[in-house]
Amino acid sequence: IVRQISVENPLLRQGIFGKGGEARRKGKAGVGTARAKAFAKKGQICYDGDKPTEKGRENMKMGKQILLLAVTLLLAVAAAVLLIWLGRSASNTGTPEDTQPIPQDEQIRLQEQEGTIDKKDPGDLEPTGEEDPPEDELLYQSLGNGTCCVLGPGGVRDACLVIPKISPAGERVAKIASKAFFGCEWITAVQIPETVREIGTLAFADCKNLVYISVNEQNPVYCDADGVLYTADQRVLLQYPPQRAGDPLALPASVSTISEMAFYGCKNLKSVNYEGSGEDWEHIEIGSRNYALLAAAIRFDVTSE
């Protein structure tokens, strides 16, 4: 008895499962039986009784292949959509440090436009008194105890920036504010006196032409080593001049922290001779946007001569 035929031929469905086919399944002769036999001779019947014919097996195999192909295509489309979504999500969340960053100059400009980097933090001190200092004076803020803080370059555009010990108002200069000289491209050298007890974050960051930083030897809080700014105990590296000529950098094993943007824009830095071991290096806290340092070749257990 014919139970299944090729679904691809509507004439077969009408012939076998029409009135004649129904009569055939009930054991009666009908039009369906005659048509079934005719199509059976042409090899179109899929089942002969309970057993599939050769044509039926071919149809089942083809159906499985089509189903497998459809599932594969669906999975491929889903994977492509997922990859596109992940790519857009990654681009919207910024550039991780372990990926190739946007050129540094362009990145700073974009961040400033977006408000993620300001020249001055909201909590920074605001100047009082004269808003426009004389052309040859820095911008100061009195701290009220005979000391003052340098807020910025004011009217000074000297290539060699000299932080004085005493302000024009007669107060001792004890602090350099956060981002005080951020992005001052005309500065090539900085001299810090012994009176300074605090240097805010990013005070000299993004000074693209900075070559050397010197600190008075009598300063108990800060020091310099070959033009690089450290805390006096050399546990914190605050700023590496972008245009420093010496390479490689001799980095003391005592360093445990490298400040944010300390190596920003330092294209001349190619290698670092680190006095500590590879394990010591892994424990150093490295601030963000120190791309040049992360790209440099690091040599471990190198003792400075």
Image (cartoon, rainbow, N blue to C red):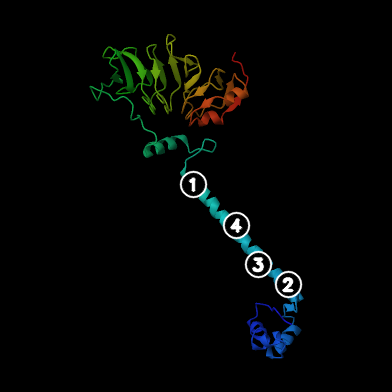
Give the residue type at disc 4: Ala
Does dot 4 land on a helix, a strand or a loop?
helix
**Residue 47 visible in image:** yes
Point out which mark residue 76 bears. 4
Q: Is 290 left or right of 64, judged from the image as shown? A: left
The residue carrying mark 3 is: 66
- Closer to the camera, 177 or 271? 177
Near mark 4 (Cα within 10 A), the count class, few <14, some 14-19 or many ≥20, is few
**Label 2 vs label 4, nearer the camera:** 2
| The residue positioned farthest toward the top in the image shown | 218
* Whole-number angstrom distance, CA of label 2 to CA of label 4: 27 Å
Residue 58's disc number: 2
Image spot of residue 255 (x, y percent): 53, 19
Q: Please tell me which of labels 2 and 1 falls first in the chain.
A: 2
Check the image and report above or below for 295 versus 24. above
Q: Amino acid at mark 1?
A: Ser
Q: Earlier in the sequence, mark 1 or mark 4?
A: 4
Specify whether 93 is left or right of 176: right
Mark-to-mark CA distance, 2 and 1: 47 Å
Q: Position of residue 82 (x, y in %)?
A: 54, 52
Position of residue 201 measured from the top left corner of the image (x, y, whole percent)? 41, 25
- Which corner quadrant of the image does residue 130 belong to? top left
How packed is label 2: few (under 14 Cα within 10 Å), some, or many (20 or more)? Answer: few
Marked residue nearer the N-terminal end (3 or 2): 2
Amino acid bearing label 3: Ile
Q: Secondary structure at mark 3?
A: helix
Give the alpha-carbon distance from disc 1 to disc 4, as whole Å. 20 Å
* Pointer 3 with pointer 2, Cβ within 8 A: no
* Local SS, label 1: helix
**Helix, strand or loop for disc 2:** helix
